[in-house]
Amino acid sequence: MIRHVVLINFRPELDEAAISRALNSVATLKEKIDGILAVTGGANNSPENLEKGFRHGFVVDFRDAAARDAYLPHPEHMKVGKALVEAARGGIAGILVFDYEV
């Protein structure tokens, strides 16, 4: 299984409703793209204060690397990804992506 972790530093002026819509759009990908096992996400709630501006994030679990690789160019992923990148522009760090095998 491949775990795809995405941390987002949304623009400060983006309201919580817009952030929720963006994160919910990611969750809908599970029904649209084969090979996605689970999608979870939300706001950071760690008491450690180490998020460095990345206040929101999500995780997509893929069946395997081939499923992840098919997801990357998928039109639905491209559409959602473009909206997330546009929403994050102006943040200190933008978006951080980290994949690993479980």
Image: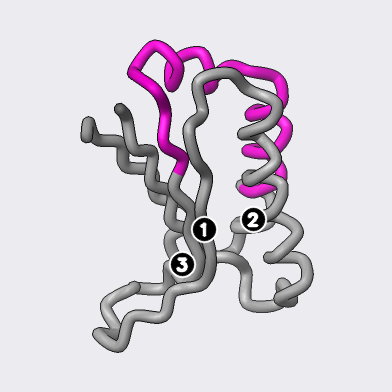
Task: Classify 87 as above or below 92.
Answer: above
Image quadrant in which the C terminus is located: top left
Tell me whether the residue at label 2 lies in contact with that at label 1, contact meaning CB atoms closer than 8 angstroms. yes
* Contact check, label 2 and label 3, Cβ < 8 Å: no
Q: Which mark is residue 23?
A: 2
Name the residue rendered at 64%, 55% in the picture. Answer: 23
Q: Position of residue 19 (x, y in %)?
A: 69, 65
Per the image, label 1 sits on a secondary structure element best described as: strand
The residue depicted at 51 percent of the width and 53 percent of the height is: 40
What kind of element bears circle 3?
Answer: loop
As measured in the structure, the alpha-carbon distance from the residue carrying label 2 to the one carrying label 3 is 19 Å
What secondary structure characterizes most of the magenta part? helix
Q: How many marks?
A: 3
**Residue matched to label 1:** 41
Q: Residue at x 52, y 58 (%)?
A: 41
Q: Amino acid at mark 3?
A: Ile
- Residue 18 on image: x %, y %: 77, 66
In this orientation, which residue lies closer to the viewer: 75 or 101? 101
- Per the rendered image, the range of residues in magenta is 60-84
Q: CA distance from mark 3 to mark 1?
A: 20 Å
Location of mark 3 (residue) = 92
Label 2 vs label 3, nearer the camera: 2
- Please determine whether, in this image, residue 39 is positioned above or below residue 43: above
User: Residue 12 sits in which quadrant?
Assistant: bottom right
Residue type, label 1: Gly
- Which one is earlier in the sequence, the residue at label 2 or at label 1? 2
Three-letter code, disc 2: Leu
Residue 49 position, x and y percent, is 30, 84
